Image (cartoon, rainbow, N blue to C red):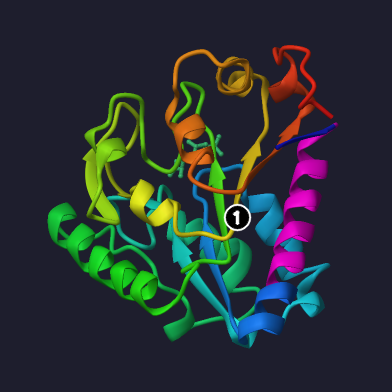
Amino acid sequence: MLVRLKTPEAVARAAAAAVVESAFKAIHEHGEFRLVLAGGRTPRAAYALLATELREEIDWRRVIFYFSDERCVGPDDPASNYRMAREALFDPLKLQGGAVHRMAGELAPGAAAADYDAEIKAVIAARKPAFDLTLLGVGGEGHTASLFPGSPALEEATRTVASVTVPADPPDRLTMTPVALGASREILFLVTGQEKAHALATIFGGGDDLPAARVARLGPSRFLVDEPAASELPESPGRN
Ligand code: 6PG
């Protein structure tokens, strides 16, 4: 499903509201909320809203955080997705320790991927769906998490996490595979900016089977997009 919004701020607000709604449902149903965080720049504003205006809307003691991907850098590196989430969400909420399951970007990629794979496999074995909500972004060429077009990790059928080398900076990454991304009650894509317009038009126009399109078919998914990102979308009944 596609939801068109005017501005990046409106996308952030809608995303934060969706997290609150999903958290309420999950905590009500099973006493905890398992949230997979997206990296990159786009989700930062939504995280900041959750940590400020909406902080009273969620019982943060019952939230368990995971990451959909990470750059192979240390947790204090400016390129670290964990650092972005720490600055925008964890630190303002004074969240530490056990509830935050980060990918160890500072370790050797193979070892870090194997460690997180074991952790995610245990979560998937313990509860279905394993995750209540997974947040993802979309890149200009249609990648999501660190699953880029042509990546062997897209074909992964057993490992939940893989180490990959991507045509972006930094190139070495850890990423959830479709095995883990498909274990979520819902996937929410946050997509803003003109540079995403062609990929979005391809995803919804039925062109090349881009990674984001393939991941979106793994289960219930929603795209929150702003006007510039939606600017090349074909007129279609699914557009609202
Ligand atoms: C990453 C992300 C990646 C991101 C897209 C969009 O680590 O970079 O997980 O998949 O979501 O590249 O990035 P922006 O939000 O910065 O445009």
| Left/right of residue 157 with respect to residue 45 in the rendered view | left
Q: Which residue appears at 76% of the width and 38% of the height?
A: 8
| Left/right of residue 217 with respect to residue 23 in the rendered view | left
Q: Is residue 8 above or below residue 100?
A: above
Q: Residues within 10 Å of mark 1 (few under 14, many from 20)?
A: many
Residue 217 highlighted magenta (yes or no): no
Residue 18 highlighted magenta (yes or no): yes
| Left/right of residue 216 with respect to residue 225 in the rendered view | left
Residue stretch in magenta? 6-23
Note whether ligand 1 is within 8 Å of mark 1.
no
Q: Can residue 171 be spotted in the picture?
A: no
Give the quadrant of residue 67.
bottom left
Q: Can residue 21 be spotted in the picture?
A: yes
Q: Position of residue 233 (x, y in %)?
A: 71, 16
Q: Is residue 58 above or below residue 202?
A: below
Q: Position of residue 15 (x, y in %)?
A: 73, 52
Identify the residue position indicated by label 1 in the image: 186
Q: Which residue appears at 74% of the width and 48% of the height?
A: 12
| Left/right of residue 13 with respect to residue 25 in the rendered view | right
The C terminus lies in quadrant = top right
Give the quadrant of residue 168.
top left
* Magenta stretch prevailing secondary structure: helix
Q: Which residue appears at 27% of the width and 65% of the height?
A: 116
Q: Secondary structure at mark 1?
A: loop
Q: Position of residue 132 (x, y in %)?
A: 58, 66
Callout 1, which amino acid? Answer: Glu
Give the number of marks.
1
The N terminus lies in quadrant = top right
